[in-house]
C-alpha cells in the first residue's frame, strides 16, 4: 500500500563525529539533490514556488506529454503530498520539442515564469517529469510548498540499457510487486526490466499452444527436511496480465525484456512435456536451487516448439530484445543421447557447445526475421557466437570484452558486483541471500565500460544491469530490501557521465530519494548507513579484564554517529562518536547516525558487552571451519515468509566454527540446531561435497575445541547422534561440558550426516560459566 505519511529516513553514517556530505535544507536546494546526476546544469537567478493547486499543462492531443503529466501528478502527490491541477496555462508546461536530439534526452527550465519540460521523445518527457518530481520533494516537508531555484538542465543518458533483472521463476513474484518496482525504476530513470520467466523451478509465462507449461510447470512441491512432503507453491502470468504490465511500463519509459531459458534450466518444461526432453523420463518441477541436468531436445520438434513460444512471447512483449538464457546448461543429457549425437553428426557439429551455438543461431535468425534481436548469457559464446546474438556478461567482464571485440552488442551484469541478491552487509539483521557482500559503494564504484574494450568498439556496450535472483526472495519486503537503495547507484553509473560521478556527493543526493521511496511504500535497506561495532581484542579479553574498547563505524561516509550507554535510544543531542569507546563490561551501546538537521538516518543498532552476550554467537557470528566457506544465508524453509531465523552455511561441508571461545571463562555450552532441506542441485560441483563417515544411522554433531591450531589434535568436547529426520523436530538443542583449558580456542561444530539426509546448521551457541 502507498503511504501519505511523511518519509521515515533510515539510512546513513560514518566513523567520526565530523559531518561528511550532510546538508541542511538550504544547502540541499542549492546543490539540487538529483539522482542520477544530470549531464549539464546551469544555475539562474530567482526561483519558483510549487504548491498544492499549481497547474500542469500538456497538449491534450499528444499522448506522450499527457502521460508524462499524469506521472508527474501521481509522484508529487505520493512523495510530497501536494495535489497539482491540470490546466491550459500551467505553471508547469510539458512540451514536445523536436529540436532536442535523443529519444531519452530532455531539457528542464526553471525561471520566475514557471517550469518547462521539453523533449522530442516520450521517454525524454517522462525523465524530465521525474527530475521535476525530485526537485519538488527535496526534503521532509511533506505537504508543504517547495521553492525551486532557477536552473536549466540539459540531460541525456550515457547508456541506453539501464536495467534490472527480476527472477520470477525460483519464487513467483506477484504482479502488484512488479508494478511497484516499475514505478520506482522510473523515478531514477532505469529503463529496462528483464523478467526471468522460466527455469527448473517454474514456468511463469502462459503459452496458449502448450497449456501444460503452466498447468503443470508453474507449480512445485516444496522440499521437506525428512518429514512429509511440503506444500505446493507457484503461479504464472496470463498473457493479458503481462500486456497490461507492458503498457504500464511503457508509459514510464521502461521496456520489458522477457527471458525463456534454454537449453538448460528446462526441468519445468520437461515436467510438463516429457517428449520435449532428451531421455524420455518425466521429472517433477524442481524444488532444488542450482544447476539441474535437464535440457530441452534440440531436434526438429524442439526447435518448432521454441519458435511457437517465441511467437507468443513477441505478441505480448513488443520490445526489440528477447532473452534466451543459454546459461549453466551442463551437457550430460546431450552427451548420453543417441538421438542428439546423431543430430550432431548430421549437422557436422563436433561438440555439444557447438550444438548450443547452432541452436541459438536458429532462434536468432528466427527473431531477426520478425524484426527482433536475441540476447543471452555469456555462455552462448562457447562453441562460437552466432552473428545474430548479443551477450549479457555475468561471469565477470570477459564475455563482454570478447563479444564486443567481435562486434557484438553487450550488456554488463557481472557477478558478484551487480548481483543484487548478494547481501549488503554482514550484519545479523540482513535477510537471506548470498554472502558475497555487495555494498552500496561497491555498486556505485563499478564502471560499466570494461578496460579491455577499445574506444572504437565502445558503442557495442549497451549498458549495465543489476540481477536479482529469487531463491531467497519470498516476499515483496525481501525484494525491495535488496533493490533499494542500490537501484540509485545502478541508475547513476548507467545514466551519468563517468566524470559526473562522486560517491560523497551521491550519498548526499540519495537521501531525499530514499525518503521518496519510503513515502511510496518501499522497503529501503539502511545497511550502508547503519552503525557497526568492532571489539578490540577478543571477547575473552573483555571478559578477563571486565572492560571493552569498541570502535563504531559505517559503510558509507555520511552523517554523524551518536550513541548512548544507558540503554536509551540515541537522539540528535546524544554524544557524537569521535574515538573508540573504553567502557566497563556490561554496558549496552546503542548508536545511530544523524544528519546536520538532526534527522536520524538509520535505525539504532545495539552492542551488548554483558557476559552472557559476549559468550553467545549466532549464525551470523560464526566463521567457516578450516578449508570451508560460508557462502549462503538461508531461511529455515524455502517458503519462509519471515526474515529470521537465518543460517549461514557451507553447501559442501556442514561445519561452522565459534571463533576464539574464552575457555578460561566457559565451562559448558548449549547449541541450538536447525535441520534444513537438502535442496541444492550441484551438478558437476557434487564432487566438492565433503563426505564424513557417520558412525550412527543419521550422523553426529561433533564439538571440537582447538580445531584450527595447525598440527594440533583438537579436543572432542562432545558427540551427539542426530535424530531420525522423519520423526524429529526441525529445531532442537544439545548441551555439554567443555574441557578445562585456558586462553581462546576456536570450536568447530562438525555435522557428519550422510549426504542423502537433510542439511544441519547452527542457529546459536551459548557458552555457560557453569558446568
Image: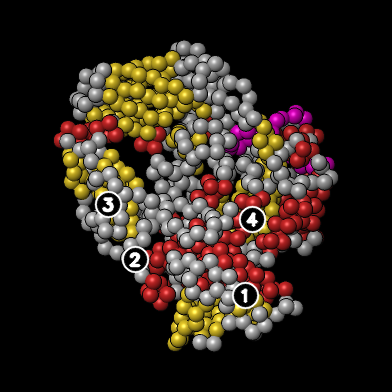
Relative to residue 261, is residue 144 depicted above or below?
Answer: below
Residue 137 location (% of width, % of height): 49, 69
Location of residue 618 (image quadrant): top left
The residue carrying mark 2 is 597
Circles 3 and 1: CB distance less than 8 Å?
Answer: no
Calculate the distance from the C-alpha at mark 1 to the C-alpha at mark 4: 25 Å
- Asked if 110 appears above or below 600 in the picture, the reply is below
Is 371 colored magenta in this rendering? no
Secondary element at image label 4: helix
Looking at the picture, tell me which residue is in the foreground, 199 or 561: 561
Taking the view exactly as shown, the residue that stands out farthest to the top is 696
- The number of numbered discs placed on residues in the rendered structure image is 4
Determine the secondary structure under disc 2. loop
Q: Earlier in the sequence, mark 4 or mark 2?
A: 4
Inter-mark Cα distance, 2 to 1: 32 Å
The residue indicated by pointer 4 is: 179
What residue is pinned by disc 1? 85
Q: Which residue is mark 3?
A: 563
Packing grade of label 3 (10 A; few <14, some 14-19, many >=20) is many
Q: Locate residue 675 relative to residue 216 in the image: left or right.
A: left
Q: Position of residue 103 (x, y in %)?
A: 65, 74
Question: Which one is in front in this view, the residue at disc 3 or the one at disc 1?
Answer: 1
Answer with mark 2 or mark 1, whichever residue precedes in sequence.
1
Segment tinted magenta in the rendering:
280-302
Amino acid at each position: 500500500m502507498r503511504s501519505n505519511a511523511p518519509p521515515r529516513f533510515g539510512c546513513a553514517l560514518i566513523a567520526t563525529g565530523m559531518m561528511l556530505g550532510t546538508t541542511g535544507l538550504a544547502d540541499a536546494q542549492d546543490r539540487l539533490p538529483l539522482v542520477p546526476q544530470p549531464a549539464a546544469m546551469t544555475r539562474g537567478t530567482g526561483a519558483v514556488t510549487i504548491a498544492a493547486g499549481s497547474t500542469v499543462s500538456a497538449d491534450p492531443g499528444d499522448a506522450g506529454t499527457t502521460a508524462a503529466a499524469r506521472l508527474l501528478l501521481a509522484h508529487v502527490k505520493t512523495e510530497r503530498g501536494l495535489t497539482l491541477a491540470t490546466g491550459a496555462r500551467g505553471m508547469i508546461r510539458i512540451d514536445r520539442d523536436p529540436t532536442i536530439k535523443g529519444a531519452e534526452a530532455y531539457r528542464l527550465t526553471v525561471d520566475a515564469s514557471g517550469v518547462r519540460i521539453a523533449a522530442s521523445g516520450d521517454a525524454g518527457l517522462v525523465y524530465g517529469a521525474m527530475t521535476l518530481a525530485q526537485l519538488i520533494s527535496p526534503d521532509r516537508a511533506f505537504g508543504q510548498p517547495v521553492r525551486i531555484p532557477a536552473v536549466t538542465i540539459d540531460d541525456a543518458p550515457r547508456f541506453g540499457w539501464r536495467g534490472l533483472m527480476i527472477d520470477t521463476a525460483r519464487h513467483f513474484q506477484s504482479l502488484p510487486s512488479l508494478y511497484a518496482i516499475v514505478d520506482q525504476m522510473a523515478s531514477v530513470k532505469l529503463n529496462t526490466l528483464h523478467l526471468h520467466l522460466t527455469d527448473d523451478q517454474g514456468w511463469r509465462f502462459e503459452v496458449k499452444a502448450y497449456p501444460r507449461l503452466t498447468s503443470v510447470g508453474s507449480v512445485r512441491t516444496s522440499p521437506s527436511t525428512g518429514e512429509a512432503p511440503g506444500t505446493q507453491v507457484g503461479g504464472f502470468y496470463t498473457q493479458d496480465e503481462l500486456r497490461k504490465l507492458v503498457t504500464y511500463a511503457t508509459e514510464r519509459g521502461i521496456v520489458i525484456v522477457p527471458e525463456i531459458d534454454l537449453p538448460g534450466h528446462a526441468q519445468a518444461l520437461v515436467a510438463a512435456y516429457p517428449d520435449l526432453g532428451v531421455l524420455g523420463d518425466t521429472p517433477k518441477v524442481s524444488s532444488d536451487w542450482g544447476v539441474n541436468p535437464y535440457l530441452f531436445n534440440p531436434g526438429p520438434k524442439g526447435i518448432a516448439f521454441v519458435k511457437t513460444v517465441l511467437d507468443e512471447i513477441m505478441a505480448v512483449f513488443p520490445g526489440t530484445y528477447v532473452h534466451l538464457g543459454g546459461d549453466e546448461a551442463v551437457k550430460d543429457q546431450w552427451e548420453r543421447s543417441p538421438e542428439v549425437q546423431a543430430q550432431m553428426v548430421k549437422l557436422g557439429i563436433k561438440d555439444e557447445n557447438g550444438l548450443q551455438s547452432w541452436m541459438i543461431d536458429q532462434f536468432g535468425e528466427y527473431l531477426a526475421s520478425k524484426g527482433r534481436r536475441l540476447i543471452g548469457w555469456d555462455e552462448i559464446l562457447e562453441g562460437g557466437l552466432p552473428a545474430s546474438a548479443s551477450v549479457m556478461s555475468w561471469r565477470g567482464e570477459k564475455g563482454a570484452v570478447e563479444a564486443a571485440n567481435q562486434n557484438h552488442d553487450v550488456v554488463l551484469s557481472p557477478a558478484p558486483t551487480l548481483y543484487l541478491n548478494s547481501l549488503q552487509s554482514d550484519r545479523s539483521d540482513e535477510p537471506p541471500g548470498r554472502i558475497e557482500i555487495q555494498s552500496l559503494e561497491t555498486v556505485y564504484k563499478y564502471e560499466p565500460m570494461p578496460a579491455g574494450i577499445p574506444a572504437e568498439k565502445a558503442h557495442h556496450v549497451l549498458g549495465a544491469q543489476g540481477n536479482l535472483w529469487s531463491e531467497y526472495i519470498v516476499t515483496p519486503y525481501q525484494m525491495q530490501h535488496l533493490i533499494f537503495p542500490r537501484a540509485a547507484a545502478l541508475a547513476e553509473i548507467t545514466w551519468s557521465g563517468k566524470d559526473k560521478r562522486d560517491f560523497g556527493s551521491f550519498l548526499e543526493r540519495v537521501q531525499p530519494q530514499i525518503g521518496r521511496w519510503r513515502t511510496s511504500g518501499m522497503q529501503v535497506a539502511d545497511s550502508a548507513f547503519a552503525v557497526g561495532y568492532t571489539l578490540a581484542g577478543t571477547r575473552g579479553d573483555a571478559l578477563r579484564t571486565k572492560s571493552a574498547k569498541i570502535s563504531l563505524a559505517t559503510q558509507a561516509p555520511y552523517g554523524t554517529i551518536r550513541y548512548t550507554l544507558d540503554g536509551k535510544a540515541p537522539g540528535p543531542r546524544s554524544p557524537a562518536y569521535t574515538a573508540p569507546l573504553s567502557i566497563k563490561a556490561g554496558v549496552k551501546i546503542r548508536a545511530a547516525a544523524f544528519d546536520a538537521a538532526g534527522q536520524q538516518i538509520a535505525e539504532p543498532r545495539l552492542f551488548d558487552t554483558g557476559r552472557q552476550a559476549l559468550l553467545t554467537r549466532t549464525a551470523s557470528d560464526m566463521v567457516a571451519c578450516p578449508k570451508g566457506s560460508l557462502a549462503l544465508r538461508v531461511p529455515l524453509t524455502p517458503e519462509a515468509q519471515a526474515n529470521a531465523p537465518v543460517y549461514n552455511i557451507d553447501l559442501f561441508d556442514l561445519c561452522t566454527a565459534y571463533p576464539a571461545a574464552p575457555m578460561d571463562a566457559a565451562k559448558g555450552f548449549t547449541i541450538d540446531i536447525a535441520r534444513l532441506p537438502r535442496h541444492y542441485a550441484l551438478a558437476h560441483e557434487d564432487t566438492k561435497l565433503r563426505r564424513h563417515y557417520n558412525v550412527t544411522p543419521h550422523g553426529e554433531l561433533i564439538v571440537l575445541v582447538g580445531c584450527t591450531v595447525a598440527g594440533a589434535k583438537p579436543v572432542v568436547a562432545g558427540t551427539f547422534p542426530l535424530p531420525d529426520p522423519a520423526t524429529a523436530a526441525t529445531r532442537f538443542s544439545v548441551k555439554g561440558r567443555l574441557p578445562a583449558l585456558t586462553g581462546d580456542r576456536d570450536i568447530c561444530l562438525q555435522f557428519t550426516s550422510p549426504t542423502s539426509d537433510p542439511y544441519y546448521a547452527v542457529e546459536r551457541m551459548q557458552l555457560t560459566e557453569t558446568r
